[in-house]
Amino acid sequence: MTGLGRALVLAGLVMTGPALAQDPLHTVLEFSDLSGWADDDHDAALRTFIDTCSDMRDPDWRALCGVARDQTSGRAFFELFFRPVMIEDGNPGLFTGYFEPELDGSRRATPRFRYPVYAMPPEARLTDLWLPRRDIETSGVMQGRGLEIAWVDDPVELFFLQVQGSGRIRMPDGQMIRVGYAGKNGHEYRSVGLELVRRGVYDQHQVSAEVIKNWVRRNGEEGLDLLRHNDSYVFFREVSHVPANKGPLGAMNRSITTLRTIAVDPAFVPLGAPVWIEKAGADPMHRLMIAQDTGSAIKGAQRADIFFGTGDAAGRLAGTLKDPGRMVVLMPIQRAYALLAEGAE
């Protein structure tokens, strides 16, 4: 997925992140330093770790992946083979949430289902910068080429599907198809939430994903024009081979897990690594997650996007999340102390 860290960026509530720190600070902790560690379901975290660890290329990680499959106690496994490492780049911790949208759609265009979900045109793959959103949607360049994966009934939900980067589409007969990120047109994201603030429609503290959706729906063509303020456009591919009872594909091209997967900045956190999170806010969360995804808004050592699952209820939970806290990466023992030694040089 491409991480409502993602929708919060849409609303203009989160900056795209700090520049990468040249020398992040690494601090090796004890498991006793992790608040709530003993109370978590470590076996659930172990199962999620096993889902993607075989795709990690580093020899230290691959060795632990082989050992993981024979474990009977998740907590014993993590405490025996890992050490908690706090990685800091000078920026405070920030947690947001994301989810997999569900849209209503059809395999063919109808008066109701008339907004196409497009596959990526071949010529868009050959350039770093292709047509902006407005031209893609209004110039006719996409028509008659068989690039439509499906048609949906709501252009606002289609826009948010592009923000999330993947989703499910419910056919009239109840069948589900799943779509995943295939590429984009190369244009930088422009926040429609900030554009509403610039126009004087709302103050910044009033803007949210739901506020944007409702404004666009109330304002017809003017609403669609607001969405076209964002030149960035995402194309999809069908991934219906992923079973409906599994999560969408993450950055490791494996299904992600509700409330066990986070999106991280791979410049600081290895994809596939276990990460202990201590999220503050109105609904604190202390649990062991697995870093299985990334997102364009997820930048920094202490920045994470929590996957809340599929559908509207998950979207409501994800869309309200913007909390401080900290995250601690569990590293193979030898790797943890090597990082510490490198920092001391």
Image (spheres, rainbow, N blue to C red):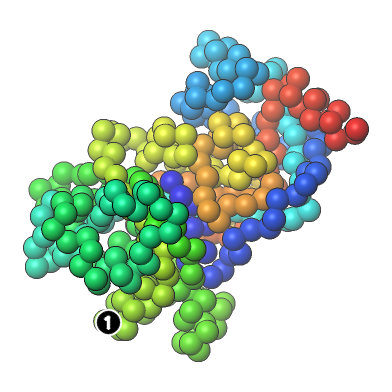
Residue 295: where, in percent of width, then height?
A: 52, 50
Is residue 245 shown left or right of residue 147? right
Dot 1 falls on a residue whose secondary structure is helix
Residue 96: where, in percent of width, then height?
A: 56, 55
Residue that label 1 marks: 221
Category of crowding for the residue at label 1, using alpha-carbon neighbours closer than 10 angstroms: few (below 14), some (14–19), many (at least 20): few
Is residue 174 shown left or right of residue 191? left
Residue at 49%, 70% (x, y): give it.
Answer: 191
Is residue 252 shown left or right of residue 145? right
Instruction: Give the quarter of the image for residue 91.
Output: bottom right
Q: Residue furthest right?
A: 345
Residue at 26%, 42% (x, y): give it.
Answer: 238
User: Do we see residue 92 in this rendering?
Assistant: yes
Looking at numbered disc 1 in the image, what kind of residue is underneath it?
Glu
Q: Nearer the viewer, residue 45 or 120?
A: 120
Screen quadrant of the C terminus:
top right
Residue at 64%, 58% (x, y): give it.
Answer: 17
